[in-house]
Amino acid sequence: MRATATALLLGLIYGTPAAAQVSATASPVSNSSGSVVNQAVQVTPGQYQKFSFGSGIQCDGATLNVSPFLSGVHSYGSPNNEYYQEPVYDNSDNYGLKDPETGLDGPDGIPDNPGRVLFMKPMRTGYRSNYSNNFGITATISVPLDRRAINQCLKAAEKQVALYEQSLADKRLNYEMGRLKACAQAIREGYGWSNNSPFKAICADVVLKPIPVEAHTHAITYPQPDVKPLVRDSDLVAPGSAPVKIPVSPFSKAASSRPSS
C-alpha cells in the first residue's frame, strides 16, 4: 500500500503542468562527468611440462608460464563539440506597472519581451579525450607436490637411458666388428676402394697383422726302441748235454772247392 501511494503521488507531481517562470537572475550551470574503466588480466596456468623417455615413462616437471600483455583505452564524448551555443534572453523589465501618483510606467517584475533571444553565447563544454595504456607481464609457476612419484620416475628414466646407451654401444660394436672383418677379407683377397672413392675411408684404419704366438713350452719325448732279448748259444743246448766245438778253418773244403775266377 505504501509503495502504491508513493507511485500515485509521484505521478500527480510529474503529471501536472508546470507554470513557466521567468527570472532575471543569472544562474550559472556547472556540469561534470567522469568515466571509470575496469580492466582485468586473466592468468590461466597450463599443463605441467612432460618429459617422455620411451617405454611409457613420462615425468612431470615444474612449469613457468609467462604472459606479456598490452592494452589501451581511448574514451571521448559524442558529439565531439568543444563549444556549444547558449541563447541569451532579453530580461529587460521597463514597463508594466504605472505609478498612480505620477502616471509613469515602470518595471513590474515581468520581462517585457519574454523568450526573446538577444544573441547566442559560445560556452565551453570542457571536453577532453582520455587515453590509457597498460602493459606488463604475468607469470605463474606450477610445481608438482608429490615429489616421491617424481623421484621414482626420474630413477626409471635414468635406467631407461642407460639401457638405450648400452644398446647403442652393442650395435656400435657389431658394426665395427663387421666392418673390420669385411675390410680384412677385402685386403687379404687383394681388392678395395679406389683413391678417389668417397668410401675409401671405411677401411683406412684396418691393418693386417700376423697372428700372435704366445710363449709356451713343449715336452720332448723320445720313442723307445723295440729291444728283443738276446739268445745265447748255451740257451739253445739242451740241459745236461756237453758243448760241442765246431772247428772253423778259412781253408776248408768248402772254400777250396769254390771255382776260381
Image: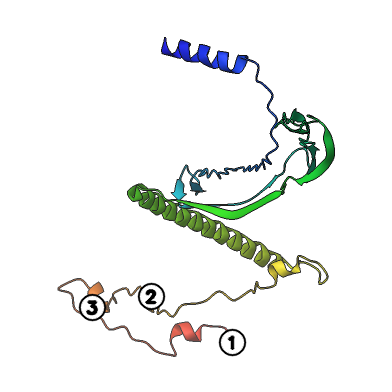
Quadrant in the picture for the N terminus: top left
Query: Which is nearer the eye, 160 or 70?
Result: 70
- Using the image, tell me which numbered label, if any, was put on residue 225: none
Query: Which is nearer the eye, 146 or 165?
Result: 146
Residue at left offset 69%, top offset 34% = 23
Q: Could you tell me the amino acid type at mark 3? A: Ser
Q: Quadrant of residue 218?
A: bottom left
Q: Is residue 236 above or below residue 101?
A: below
Q: Which residue is disc 3 drawn over?
A: 234
SS assignment at label 3: helix
Q: Earlier in the sequence, mark 3 or mark 1?
A: 3
* Viewer-side label of 3, 2: 2
Quadrant in the picture for the C terminus: bottom right
Q: Are marks 2 and 1 in contact (CB under 8 Å)?
A: no
Real-space CA distance between mark 3 and mark 2, rounded to the nearest whole angstrom: 32 Å
Real-space CA distance between mark 2 and mark 1, rounded to the nearest whole angstrom: 49 Å
Q: Is residue 132 above or below residue 105?
A: below
Q: Position of residue 101 (x, y in %)?
A: 72, 31
Query: Which is nearer the eye, 92 or 182?
Result: 92
Residue at left offset 84%, top offset 38% = 118
- Using the image, tell me which numbered label, if any, was put on residue 260: 1
Q: Earlier in the sequence, mark 3 or mark 2?
A: 2
Q: Is residue 35 left or right of residue 123?
A: left
Residue at left offset 38%, top offset 75% = 223
Q: Is residue 61 left or right of residue 210?
A: left
Q: Could you tell me the amino acid type at mark 1? A: Ser
- Using the image, tell me which numbered label, if any, was put on residue 223: 2
